[in-house]
Image (cartoon, grey):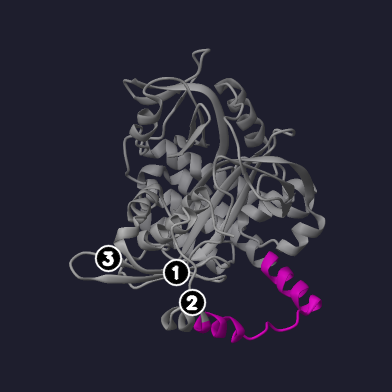
Amino acid sequence: MPWSVEDVRALAPDPTSAAAGRAQAQADRWTGLGASDAAVWGACRGRGEAEYLTCVEPAGPAFRCSCPSRKVPCKHALGLAFLWADGAVPAGEEPQWVAAWRAGRGERRRGRPPGPPRDPEAAARRAERRGERVAAGAAELREWLADRIRGGLAGAAADEVHGVAARMVDAQAPGLASGLRRAAALIGQGRDWPGLLLTELALLHVLAEAATRLPELPDDLAATVRARLGFPVDTAEVLATGERVTDEWLVAAVTDEVGERLTTRRTWLRGRTSGRPALVLAFAPFGRPLPRTFPAGHAVRGTLAFYPGAAPLRALVADADEPVRAGRPAGDPVGTALARYADALGADPWLERWPVLLADVAPVAEEEGWVLVDPEGAALPLADRVDPWPLLAVSAGAPVTVAGEWSTAGLRPLTCWDGDRVVRL
């Protein structure tokens, strides 16, 4: 079954790639177009006399293109998928290069050796040893933080902080190491860096203190602390024992974050009946396509299994129907959105970002930057690095519904609705 145009747009690594792919979806730019039950293919005319052989395997999804782009999928693969969604690709027999590529993918999948059988007793011993190392690392971090505060933040050096972060990696506490690296990046940056650094270090001190008292904590708070420290949680266990919520889920926003080794996709959901927010994460090694996820602006009926925690947010999709296009959702005024955030932050002080769905907010320029103002006059500032013009181009200054991520840095809009028209920002 061909994808919809929204399905294709949701696979784009960013809005710019989606627009570039749409521009490639012109039949006169392609030769040798064809589609089978398992693949779609064609050759796209590039600059000069270059032709890029492009193939999409929808079941993966997987993409192959001979162009030099490092983005996956590239604009040619997106253009081919858009043509297929438009019904402009005829049925045909797979050419040899397509069959060879698909056969190679199958061989690589079949060639993966099975993992060794799990030994529960050995796993328990490894977990115990790791817990001891993390507790020792947390105790060391507490001592270093006390010494640093006594010595004053003015003498803090990034190299020193990175050195402590390396010791936390050795202690198998990646959450503490990440926090220290964030702290190191703040040193000397802007006039307010001492205050921001103190905030980051204070949160690290609370986390380190909690790490040394895990057996004393309530189960939900202990689960939050373990997650923040970087302890893995088995997905099978979440699906088997996690809290389950069945609802019609609005796909409020989808955003990709590209790192040096890993691409992360955050899909923010909101239950229509429960009003509950949920975060579904997907990962892919750099240069590999992300798994197909729900497109923004759609709704899906299904059941989510939530990870344990004091403020459960991350979830796995236990089962779901096919997503359908949704109309303009009912959002919250700014005051309600902030109250929800305050409740979540009270339960999980290490919360990095929180989803908001704001109703009838208008972008307004103020002396200190852009803000979104609701009909009651309450406002949320946009983050400093956010470009307000895509949102302004949709709203033209009029009120719109906006979904985005709120953090201490400000609001990052990700989706907006102009009437029933949804735009991924």
Q: Residue at x 46, y 48 (%)?
A: 148
- The picture places residue 87, in percent across and down from the top left corner, at 48, 56
Residue 116 lies in the magenta-colored region:
yes
In the rendered view, tell whether residue 204 sits above or below residue 364: below
Residue 223 lies in the magenta-colored region:
no
Residue placed under numbered mark 3 in the picture: 45
Residue type at mark 1? Gly
Residue type at mark 3? Arg
Region in magenta: 103-131
Quadrant where the N terminus is found in the figure: bottom right
Residue placed under numbered mark 2 in the picture: 93
| Circle nearer the N terminus (2, 1) | 1
Distance from disc 2 to disc 3, alpha carbons, whole Å, reads 21 Å
Compared across the picture, whether 62 is left or right of 249 comes to left
Tag nearer the camera, 3 or 1: 1
Residue density around tag 1, few if under 14, some if 14–19, many if 20 or more, within 10 Å? many
Q: Residue at x 48, y 72 (%)?
A: 92
